[in-house]
């Protein structure tokens, strides 16, 4: 598990560099990605793959919102690299491979799974972003 968490950290860190995140923030991007992957690994047994991805994406989004406010950066600086370890790229590849090999039954199963995983990522980000935006708006109006 420690190796997988390290790889999640490294993937997010590397994509932070590729996406030209400010150098002072790249390690934080790695931490967000590593923590997101940790949540996925811990939750996968009890929540299932899609539920664990949703929970991990929500965690990444919450951490990104908090770090963005604390370090005066746009949320996207932490969110984009941090979410990379959760992207179902291998599932998408296996989906296409199944269709190319004319295994349509397996291809459809993998396609639906891939779409659910992508939807879980999107839902985790959207819900978190909406809650933070509403909280921020409420906080400003109370002043």
Image (cartoon, rainbow, N blue to C red):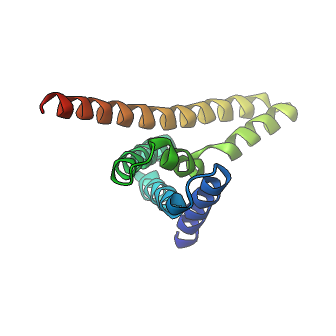
Q: Nearer the viewer, residue 96 or 139?
A: 139
Q: Nearer the viewer, residue 90 or 64?
A: 64
Left-right relation of 17 to 49: right
Residue 115 appears in which quarter of the rendering? top right
Q: Where the C terminus falls, by quadrant?
A: top left
Q: Relative to residue 19, is residue 137 depicted above or below? A: above
Residue 89 appears in which quarter of the rendering? top right
- Residue that protrudes farthest toward the right in the picture: 101
Left-right relation of 75 to 90: left
Task: Give the residue drawn at x 52%, y 51%.
Answer: 82
Q: At which x and y percent is residue 104?
A: 78, 28
Left-right relation of 20 to 134: right
Q: Nearer the viewer, residue 7 or 18?
A: 18
Q: At which x and y percent is residue 26?
A: 54, 60
Q: Relative to residue 131, is residue 35 depicted above or below? A: below
Task: Give the residue drawn at x 49%, y 45%.
Answer: 79
Task: Give the residue drawn at x 75%, y 42%.
Answer: 94
Q: Relative to residue 53, is residue 109 depicted above or below? A: above
Counting labels gives 0
Q: Nearer the viewer, residue 114 or 75?
A: 75
- Residue that protrudes farthest toward the bottom in the picture: 2
Q: At which x and y percent is residue 90?
A: 70, 46
Task: Give the residue drawn at x 55%, y 63%.
Answer: 9
């Amino acid at each position: 598990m420690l190796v997988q968490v390290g790889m999640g950290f490294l993937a997010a860190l590397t994509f932070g560099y590729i996406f030209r995140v400010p150098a002072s923030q790249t390690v934080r991007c790695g931490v967000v990605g590593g923590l997101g992957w940790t949540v996925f690994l811990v939750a996968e047994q009890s929540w299932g793959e899609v539920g664990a991805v949703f929970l991990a994406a929500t965690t990444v989004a919450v951490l990104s919102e908090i770090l963005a406010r604390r370090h005066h950066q746009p949320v996207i600086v932490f969110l984009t690299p941090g979410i990379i370890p959760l992207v179902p790229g291998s599932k998408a590849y296996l989906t296409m491979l199944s269709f190319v090999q004319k295994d349509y039954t397996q291809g459809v199963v993998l396609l639906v799974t891939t779409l659910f995983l992508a939807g879980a990522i999107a839902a985790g980000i959207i819900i978190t972003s909406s809650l933070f935006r509403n909280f921020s708006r409420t906080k400003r109006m109370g002043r």
